[in-house]
Image: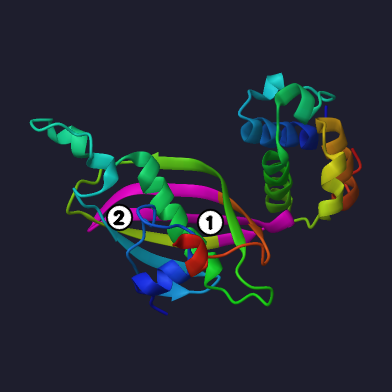
Amino acid sequence: MRLDEAGIRALLPHGHPMVLVDRVDRLRAGESIEATKVVSTSEPCYRGVPVGAPADCYAYPVSLLVESFGQAAALLWLAGATPTGPDAVLFAVARDVRIDGAAHPGDVLTHRARLDRVGPAGAVFVTGETWVGQRRLVRFGSLLAITRPGAAGAPSEEESA
Amino acid sequence: MSQHLEELREIVAEVLELEPEEVTDTADFVQDYEADSLRAIEILARIEKQYGLDIPQAELAEMRTLKAVHDIVARYAGWRD
């Protein structure tokens, strides 16, 4: 399965500018996902960078790297059909995370996430990596989210207007 | 002290971001270590994963100390320690 921006917005509750997944290229619901996000100078995180700032200042913030991967992981869960409607997915914790590099504007992040285990009380464990081309930026040893069946989903048009 | 108890202490310490020696047998996770419900679920989930168990969610409410966790897990795992 593939998802474009419209398909992503229909599943994720996030609104602009916090949608940090641009496209889903491969999705096996409940198993694995490959999603991309393009880093752009026009993103809000670069708003305060002064002219003449060194290149380091344009490294994409790690917090947003983790958020972007987390959104890909949430899509992996949300794309699975549930009889009670869209689940609420709450990011709980990421452990054993190794960061080996930085992304900069123009880079295309590729998140590869796999569902590791569905635990008790709606706990879902995901593992995976974030790549830029052949360069692995981040390895996520274990990301834990808590899901609540049918508790929430993407906002309706009235709510997001 | 049993090996299982020490393994559980390691799991609890990792989730609560403490050193294993800081986790006593009877300290209350919520009152003494400021654990919240997410941490409690994570502890249960990691124990299930490590030992291949399926522990009912209803037991969560009782799993507030290391000793209580050990007693509950021992019951479902059939440990005799």
Residue positioned most to the left: A52
**Is residue A76 visible to the viewer in this orientation of the structure?**
no
In the rendered image, residue A134 lying in the magenta stretch gets the answer yes
In the rendered image, residue B28 lying in the magenta stretch gets the answer no
The range drawn in magenta is A116-143
Tell me the SS state at disc 1: strand
Where is mark 2, residue-wise? A131
- Residue sitting at 67 percent across and 25 percent down? B20
- Tell me if residue B15 comes above or below residue A24 in the rendering: above
Please check whether the numbered discs 1 and 2 fall on a single chain: yes
- The tag on residue B69 is none
- Residue sitting at 89 percent across and 37 percent down? B81
Dominant secondary-structure state across the stretch colored magenta: strand
Query: Is disc 1 surrounded by few (<14), some (14 to 19) or many (20+) residues within 10 Å?
Result: many
Q: Quadrant of residue A61?
A: top left
Query: Along the horizontal axis of the image, is A79 left or right of A42?
Result: right
**Is residue B10 visible to the viewer in this orientation of the structure?**
yes
- Tell me if residue A123 comes above or below residue A31 in the rendering: above
Instruction: Tell me which amino acid carries mark 2.
Output: Trp
- Residue sitting at 14 percent across and 35 percent down? A55
- Residue sitting at 89 percent across and 39 percent down? B71
Q: Position of residue A24 (x, y in %)?
A: 37, 70
User: Which one is nearer the viewer's eye here, B69 or B62?
Assistant: B62
The chain holding disc 2 is: A
Tell me the SS state at disc 2: strand
Where is mark 1, residue-wise? A126
Q: Quadrant of the C terminus of chain A?
A: bottom left
* C-alpha separation, residue under disc 1 versus residue under disc 2: 16 Å
